[in-house]
Image (cartoon, rainbow, N blue to C red):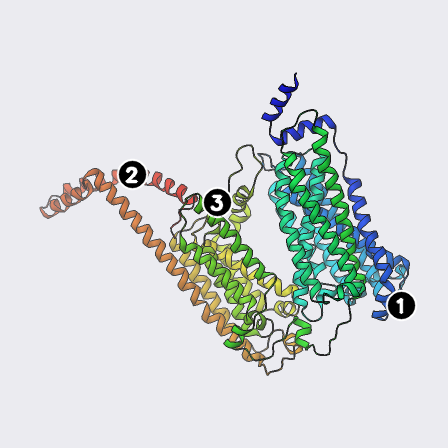
Amino acid sequence: MSDAAVATESATDSPDENFQSSARSTGRLGSPVALYAIAAVMAGLVAAVIGDAFLGQSLAALGIPDPGPVTSWGVPLVRGTGTVLACLGVGSFLMSAFGAQPRKDGYLDLDGFRASRTGTWAMAGWAVCALLLVPLYLSDASSQPLQDTLQPSMWGVAIAQVSTAKAMVWIAGIAAAATVLSLLTRRWIWQPVFFVIAVASLIPVALEGHSASGGNHDYGVNSLLWHIILSAVWIGGLMALVAHAARRGPFLVEITRRYSVVALFSIVGIALSGLINAGIRLSFAEWFTTDYGRVIVAKAVLTLILAAIGFAHRRTTIPKLGAPVTGATVAWWRRPFVRLALVEIFVMAATVGVALSLTRIPPPAEVFADITPAELIMGFDVSEPFSLAAVLINWRFDLVFGTIALLLQGVYMWAWITLRRRNVEWKTSRLVWWTLGNLLLIFVTCSGLGMYSMAMFAPHMLQHMALTMLIPVFWVLGGPMTLLLRALRPAGRDGLQGPREWLVVFINNPVSRFLTNPIVASFQFVVGFYALYLSDLYSDLASEHAGHLFMMVHFLISGYLFYWVVIGVDAAPRQLSPFMKLLMTLASMAFHAWFGIAMMQMAQPLAESYYLSLQLPFDVDLMEQQHTGGAIAWGLSELPLLVVSTAHAVQWLRQDRKEAARYDRKADRDNEADLDAYNAMLSGLGEGRDAAAEAYYRTEYRGDEVQGYVHSEKTKRDAKRGHRGESDV
């Protein structure tokens, strides 16, 4: 075949077909296991070397002797190795969930299965490393030899007295759960669940260390939480992408482009969260005058290098991946991508090592003389009694929920602008509802209400009711599912599944159908109140930052799931009749009212030790706060009932108008034959002709059969229009 023919044939192939053919001609890259091992050991060695250089100063600051070289080198080496394995697990499940094309039977294809199994064994390694760190951290904290802390009898001491060891036990349990569950199934639909569990295994890391204590620790923990999760997605995603190329997996070009977008947002988030996390512990001048600051500078420089490599990928290598390929240029366009990606992975591993070394270096000494007990526990102080003025004047941006509100608003605005550019109609009222929901989320978490909710029970209950009964209502009325289904482009028959297909699966799957069952949705909405506040659970969660985050996430998800079913204006697994929706609302609100009454009748305050430990500078009657909180729960339960009932009334009105319009169209078609027949029947009855009435009803019955068929076909057409987003409200 001539060179021109080869060029013509290559130009007609898709980029992924070009990649497949070129990979076959040049051979595969080989197993990435060696790459994973080198990156993991590299991260651990970098952390160990840097940490060892400053270990003496760190131990002197803590007032404990040196535990010995096995512990001193073992802690950063094992933790660095485990962290890289955790990133690999996150990235591999990210690939199997969102980068693999499931088969028609719902199972993973070969490439997706390999990515999933890589994630399985990576999470198993992460669990083993976390367990090894339990005796290592006990040895590190107590200066006992490692052979003594390895004894099973010492593990209880480590978990009870060393916060980092306790966090490692949680990590081991979550990572082990991801390992076992992912071994049990090869179905694609479970891969996003494994991805979420893998990400959750990193959360305990953010709750220990320098960021979990002292002033502004809420900023420290929340910024570190974003920092760790985004870093894991960034690093693990690249490792999974290189492995995908090594396996000669399909859709490499499309997956690489998607990862490029994820990496761009990740590095922006990593930079911002890193600056916030560093800024709460030392001034900018201390970046260059202290050991802790110089290590941060080294980390920042490595991050900038990674950003430059990512920019080179976007400008140079990714466009070449999608270019037509000829036999003479196969190796030329493939090698730069692989080489640059490998360099990026090793620089990432070094960056992980530098970041982990910060846990072995004491930050500049902080002065705690002026820090109140409340600030030490919550991260901030409240200096005046709760009032409307205090709520409106005091603001403190919540890095988790404030950021989530901004992101949700940004995604909605993007979809809304996309529809406007396509000249697709979307009701302005829905945009207003969604915006109100996000503004309310910012208000209840970032204003003084968010601050007082952690210090007093009545503001906590007020925030709780807003998170459960107001914000989800506004979100659901915004119709986000329907909007995204209209805005997102379908992947096509032969394309790689994209966000629209993922959203369809999220809406239509057995788990979603189970959760949106009227009984299940109502039960989970109601039982959360009773389980949390009428037991010791709230007392256990109130004093922990993780418990605070868990409660708020639970409130939002529980409320959204309930109102997603009850309001029913958005695309959902099931649509209920207005009567059933109103029945669910009335029953649930009644249980909420009883809950409020039960709170007002309690004789013992909840989380008494926690609230007393804050030592607020003003008097707080805990029982009065609790009774006020119960009154808030009882009184505000009527507000969502009013909103939802109004929505139901609008649905009923519009449904009645549709029926009336349908009847008018039928009357126009048959010249009001039904009305004439009915009048004739009444006239016959008035004249004593019962046979006329019997004939009318017989004819009407047969007509109903025909009309029933027509109505059913009409209902099917209306349902299709509703699935496309033409909802009632």
**Disc 3 from disc 2: Cα separation:** 40 Å
Mark 2, secondary structure of its residue = helix
Mark 3, secondary structure of its residue = helix
Can residue 357 be seen here? The reply is yes
Report the residue that reaches farthest toward the top.
1
Q: Which residue is mark 3?
A: 487
Q: Residue at x 38, y 40 (%)?
A: 716
Q: Residue at x 41, y 58 (%)?
A: 583
Q: Which residue is mark 2?
A: 705
Of callouts 3 and 2, the N-terminal one: 3
Instruction: Relative to 10, say whether 424 is above or below.
Output: below
* Amino acid type at mark 2: Glu
Dot 3 crowding, Cα within 10 Å, few <14, some 14–19, many 20+: many
- Residue 566 left/right relative to 302: left
Instruction: Relative to 94, say whether 379 is above or below.
Output: below
Classify the position of the N terminus by image quarter: top right
Q: Residue at x 75, y 62 (%)?
A: 166
User: Which corner quadrant of the image does residue 149 belong to?
Assistant: bottom right
**3 or 1: mark nearer the eye:** 3
* Amino acid type at mark 1: Pro
Mark 1, secondary structure of its residue = loop
* Amino acid type at mark 3: Ala
Q: Nearer the viewer, residue 508 or 351?
A: 351
Marks 3/2 in contact by CB < 8 Å: the verdict is no
Q: Position of residue 444 (x, y in %)?
A: 53, 67
Q: Which residue is mark 1?
A: 65
**Disc 3 from disc 1: Cα separation:** 62 Å
**2 or 1: mark nearer the eye:** 1
User: Which corner quadrant of the image does residue 639 belong to?
Assistant: bottom left
